[in-house]
Image (cartoon, rainbow, N blue to C red):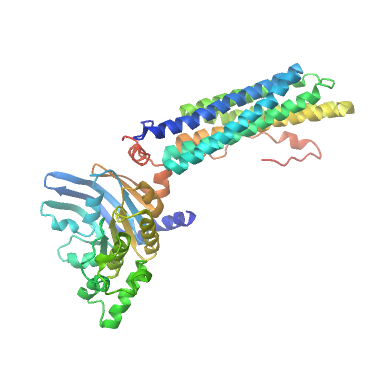
């Protein structure tokens, strides 16, 4: 815990800011889903987004790699900067952006292909490997990072869909890290998993923060407390409070945060 | 902040542990009062009741610790709820120590009842213990009302207790120098005064918890302390705090 605090203090340095959101608004048609969100997401840090259903946390997460582009009625305003560059600028290719900002979803969604091809797909289309040997290396490295290598190394040709739920989710995380992203967005990655698989994914998230900025949306307050160093609380489309996770869970400033995390009607 | 939880049983659990600590506080206040009274009236039966009563206080502390552990395990309290559980456990510990000091006073009272009384001593000790008892009562009251202002006031009042102790210390020293036959009784009386002074420190610690509970921050230690005068007595060294 002490170590995390030190990291957070270092993290205040602007050098460590990965994402910087300024006055971000998101609309679904007439519905104003995200209101004036300003936040600095740090590199090599796990940031948790918490809040009741419909508070906008997933919407905001999806706007960080332009997943909202696929929804015709959705409109994003304000600036979202990744390493100082506006991700919504016309010259930015959303496919390239999503290689840099990977995403893992609530339900494991492996491709109906072999375990090997699940991982190799991204590196292939982005041209990250020059030959089979390099690709093999990327596949092994990614599966190791996904903490699933030992379980699948003898059956890389088996279909990814044949794995257990927890293994599928770790396969999806391995797939997300295969393109060497800088940020990993996770939208309730453990809500379909049993406690053991959840613990494995949480352990993995803790390791991933050595190299990536990880942002996780979770409905489990305990999970936010366990895995993150920074926590953002969303309520009715507003970012109510953003602070060190230890502060949010021991002494939050806003009464709405306190009501939510302590399980009160707020 | 005092909106009810969605899970009503959570509220009942939190209320139950706080009710136990208040019950414990009531018993401890009584022990302080009765031990000082038994000293003044040389009432060994009363003193014996204080000694017996300490068992109940210890049992309550165990019960509080068990229930807090269960609540932590079952409900994973956060923020104000977490601070409630943490402070309940610490306060129960402080109360238990105060109870032990009262019991020790009762034990010494039984010894002192067979000796020549020291003039004025038991009245002075009674005043001191009354002050500590009032401080404890206010501290527990401020706990229930989550009133950091009263908590701070209690912390400041510990200075008076320290000063009373220092005055008694010098008085006993004078008695002992005047007549060595007073030494045994004065030593016991001095320990009693010291016990009450330590009770004051535990009450101060309870007041600290009240401030932590209501503000989320432990008070910086800016409490005035008066333990200088006793060090002026030659050759005397004290090693506590």
Which of the pair A261/A84 is nearer the observer?
Answer: A261
Vertical placement of residue A129 versus A260, above or below: below
Apparent side of residue B196 relative to residue B206 in the rendered image (left or right): right
Vertical placement of residue A37 versus B150, above or below: below
- For residue B95, say whether it is visible: no
Apparent side of residue A107 relative to residue B11 in the rendered image (left or right): left
Q: Give x and y (percent) for residue B225.
A: 64, 35
Q: Give x and y (percent) for residue B93.
A: 59, 36
Q: Which residue lies furthest to the top in this view?
A: B41
Residue at 60% across / 34% down in the picture? B94
Q: Give x and y (percent) for residue B50.
A: 68, 24
- For residue A190, say whether it is visible: yes
Quadrant housing residue B170: top right
Which of the pair A104/B127 is nearer the observer?
Answer: A104
Apparent side of residue B67 relative to residue A160 in the rendered image (left or right): right
Quadrant housing residue A94: bottom left
Apparent side of residue B189 relative to residue B156 in the rendered image (left or right): right
Q: Which residue lies furthest to the right in this view?
A: B180
Residue at 76% across / 36% down in the picture? B232
Which of the pair A162/A235 is nearer the observer?
Answer: A162
Residue at 20% across / 74% down in the picture? A125
Q: Give x and y (percent) for residue A230.
A: 37, 52
Quadrant housing residue A86: bottom left
Residue at 61% across / 26% down in the picture? B28
Q: Which quadrant, please, contains the C terminus of chain A?
A: top left
State the count of labels. Answer: 0
């Amino acid at each position: 815990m002490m170590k995390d605090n030190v990291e957070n203090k270092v993290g205040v340095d602007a050098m460590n800011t990965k994402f910087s959101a300024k006055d971000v608004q998101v609309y679904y048609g007439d519905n104003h889903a995200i209101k004036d969100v300003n936040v600095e997401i740090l590199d090599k840090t796990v940031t948790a987004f918490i809040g009741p259903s419909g508070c906008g946390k997933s919407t905001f997460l999806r706007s960080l790699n332009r997943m909202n582009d696929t929804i015709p009625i959705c409109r994003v305003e304000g600036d979202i900067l990744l390493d100082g560059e506006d991700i919504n600028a016309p010259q930015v290719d959303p496919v390239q952006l999503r290689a840099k900002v990977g995403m893992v979803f609530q339900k494991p969604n492996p491709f109906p292909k072999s375990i090997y091809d699940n991982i190799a797909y991204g590196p292939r289309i982005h041209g990250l490997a020059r030959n089979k040997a390099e690709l093999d290396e990327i596949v092994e490295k990614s599966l190791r990072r996904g903490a699933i290598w030992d379980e699948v190394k003898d059956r890389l040709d088996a279909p990814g869909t044949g794995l257990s739920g927890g293994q599928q989710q770790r396969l999806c995380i391995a797939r997300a890290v295969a393109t060497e992203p800088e940020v990993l967005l996770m939208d309730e990655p453990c809500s379909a998993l049993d406690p053991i698989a959840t613990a494995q994914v949480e352990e993995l998230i803790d390791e991933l923060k050595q190299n990536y900025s990880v942002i996780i949306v979770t409905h489990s307050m305990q999970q936010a407390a366990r895995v993150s160093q920074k926590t953002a609380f969303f309520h009715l489309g507003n970012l109510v409070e953003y602070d060190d996770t230890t502060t949010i869970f021991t002494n939050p400033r806003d009464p709405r945060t306190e009501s939510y995390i302590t399980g009160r009607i707020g | 902040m005092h909106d009810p939880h969605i899970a009503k049983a959570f509220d009942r659990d939190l209320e139950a542990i706080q009710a136990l600590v208040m019950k414990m506080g009531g018993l401890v206040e009584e022990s302080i009062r009765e031990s000082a009274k038994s000293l003044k009236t040389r009432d060994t039966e009363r003193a014996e009741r204080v000694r017996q009563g300490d068992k109940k206080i210890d049992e309550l502390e165990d019960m509080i610790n068990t229930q807090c552990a269960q609540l932590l395990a079952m409900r994973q309290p956060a923020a104000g709820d977490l601070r409630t559980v943490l402070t309940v456990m610490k306060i129960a510990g402080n109360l238990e120590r105060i109870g032990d000091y009262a019991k020790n006073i009762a034990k010494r009272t039984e010894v002192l009842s067979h000796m020549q009384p020291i003039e004025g001593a038991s009245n002075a000790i009674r005043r001191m213990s009354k002050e500590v008892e009032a401080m404890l009562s206010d501290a527990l009251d401020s706990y229930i009302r989550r009133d950091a202002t009263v908590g701070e006031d209690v912390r400041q009042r510990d200075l008076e207790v320290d000063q009373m102790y220092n005055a008694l210390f010098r008085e006993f020293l004078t008695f002992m120098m005047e007549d060595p036959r007073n030494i045994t009784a004065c030593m016991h009386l001095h320990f009693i005064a010291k016990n009450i002074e330590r009770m004051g420190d535990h009450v101060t610690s309870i007041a600290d918890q009240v401030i932590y509970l209501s503000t989320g921050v432990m008070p910086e230690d800016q409490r005035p302390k008066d333990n200088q005068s006793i060090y002026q007595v030659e050759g005397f060294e004290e090693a506590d705090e």
